[in-house]
């Protein structure tokens, strides 16, 4: 069988051995220096000033939304646009925190929201924010989206959990908005088992993310940041300051195990994303030769750090037929993320503002994907390619 993912880690045996030794030798496993070191190294990779580590990518999304609200850049009751082709943890925080989600359709050739869909939404809905999802290693025209958001006074944040290492419009995806989330769940580009990150260039946002991550207190801030907060709130007692809570927050802290694993897996990340692109391009050759499938516009991407192999069929009959090929060849497949979010039970329960999303619905009905990762062998890639050979 070719599963969606084969191993928990890259270089799994070495990583597990190093992890066991780390745990045996560590005197502290709660968040500390390894987490901070991973944040710094990840910022270097992503070419952002700051990174804040969380216990999951979903927590990273929640913390971004809460931080924007805490800072007053959005307020309860504001409408926030989001990529309709996404994961639940992009939408649920909007609902949970009193914002009004507005689903935005995608472009079929890019499987992402582009500036065209965003403009149409801004003209129709008074959105104050846009939470984009960079889907499966691809993206919309993020530079133009950034410019539109700036001109329209729309707060722009990215979910880059599926596109770590991809490049578009002269920059890494995840570097266009106020901040971007990343996931280190086992099936993602690099694994810390569970774990997530937010990267940003905004100092105030970075500070608030750390407050939100740890119950609303200031213990993980710099001394200068702590002093400013304590002076602002007239907290003069050093004893009392350690138990002062400045804004709404949660316990979303990672452990030193997360930090250690992040540092271990960062060693292999460049090779990892290089292999992912090569794998994708091999399968893409077969896709391009089959008229039953739609081609993605890969020329718009400067680098494709492919999270998975998407297959988009011209109709549902073709989809069902080729699904049988994959299943009989024992290649595990799944829907395009979770399909059209508006069809999900939680969304229908809490959101009444339903949008017309023909392209997202087309993908919901006529597409699926299989896994892509460095452990795929040449024989595995041949099996996948053969599943879509006409």
Image: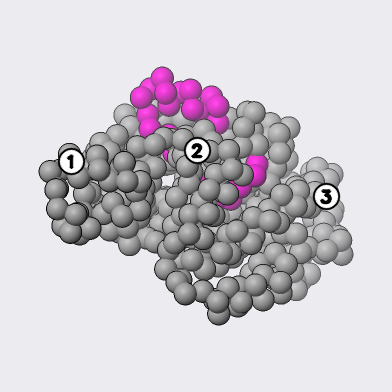
Which residue is depicted at the point 27% across and 38% down? 71
Which residue is depicted at the point 71% across and 56% down? 268
- Residue under pointer 1: 231
Residue at mark 2 to residue at mark 1: CA–CA distance: 26 Å
The picture quadrant where one finds residue 187 is: bottom right
Task: Please determine whether, in this image, residue 136 is positioned above or below residue 262.
Answer: above
Quarter of the image for the N terminus: give it: bottom right
Q: Nearer the viewer, residue 266 or 151?
A: 266
Q: Position of residue 271 (x, y in %)?
A: 75, 52
In this view of the protein, can residue 8 be seen by the observer? Answer: yes
Q: Nearer the viewer, residue 206 or 373?
A: 206
Region of the chain picked out in magenta, as a range: 142-166
**Label 2 neighbourhood size at 10 Å, few (<14), some (14-19), many (20+)?**
some
Left or right, 114 with respect to 272, comes to: left
Q: Position of residue 70 (x, y in %)?
A: 26, 43
- Residue under pointer 3: 282
Residue 158 lies within the magenta run: yes
- Residue under pointer 2: 49
Q: Are marks 1 and 3 in contact (CB under 8 Å)?
A: no
Residue at mark 1 to residue at mark 3: CA–CA distance: 59 Å
Tell me the colour scheme of the image: one colour
């Amino acid at each position: 069988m070719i599963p969606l993912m084969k191993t928990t880690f890259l270089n799994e045996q070495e990583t597990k051995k190093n992890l066991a030794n780390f745990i045996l030798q560590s005197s502290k496993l709660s968040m500390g220096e390894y987490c901070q070191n991973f944040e710094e190294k990840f910022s270097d990779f992503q070419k952002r000033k700051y990174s804040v580590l969380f216990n999951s990518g979903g927590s990273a999304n929640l913390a971004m939304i809460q931080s924007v609200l805490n800072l007053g850049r959005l307020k309860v009751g504001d409408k926030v646009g989001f990529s309709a082709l996404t994961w639940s943890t992009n939408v649920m925080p909007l609902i949970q925190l009193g914002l009004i989600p507005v689903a935005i359709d995608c472009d079929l050739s890019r499987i992402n929201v582009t500036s065209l869909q965003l403009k149409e939404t801004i003209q129709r809905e008074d959105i104050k924010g846009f939470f984009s999802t960079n889907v499966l290693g691809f993206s919309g025209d993020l530079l133009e989206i950034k410019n539109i958001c700036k001109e329209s006074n729309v707060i722009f944040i990215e979910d880059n959990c599926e596109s770590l290492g991809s490049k578009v419009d002269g920059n890494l995806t995840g570097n266009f908005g106020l901040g971007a989330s990343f996931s280190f769940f086992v099936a993602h580009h690099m694994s810390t088992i569970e774990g997530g990150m937010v990267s940003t260039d905004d100092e105030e946002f970075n500070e608030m993310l750390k407050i939100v991550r740890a119950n609303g207190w200031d213990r993980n801030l710099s001394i200068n940041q702590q002093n400013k907060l304590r002076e602002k709130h007239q907290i003069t007692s050093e004893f009392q300051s350690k138990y002062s809570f400045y804004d709404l927050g949660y316990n979303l802290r990672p452990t030193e195990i997360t930090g250690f694993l992040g540092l271990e897996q960062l060693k292999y990340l460049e090779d990892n994303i290089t292999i992912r692109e090569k794998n994708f391009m091999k399968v893409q050759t077969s896709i391009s030769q089959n008229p039953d499938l739609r081609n993605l516009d890969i020329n718009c991407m400067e680098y494709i750090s492919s999270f998975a192999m998407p297959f988009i069929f011209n109709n549902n009959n073709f989809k069902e037929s080729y699904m049988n090929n994959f299943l009989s060849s024992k290649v595990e497949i799944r829907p395009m993320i979770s399909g059209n979010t508006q069809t999900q039970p939680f969304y229908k329960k809490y959101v009444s503002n339903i949008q017309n999303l023909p392209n997202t619905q087309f993908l919901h009905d006529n597409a699926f994907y299989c896994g892509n990762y460095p452990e795929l062998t040449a024989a595995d890639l041949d099996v996948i390619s053969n599943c879509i050979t006409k």
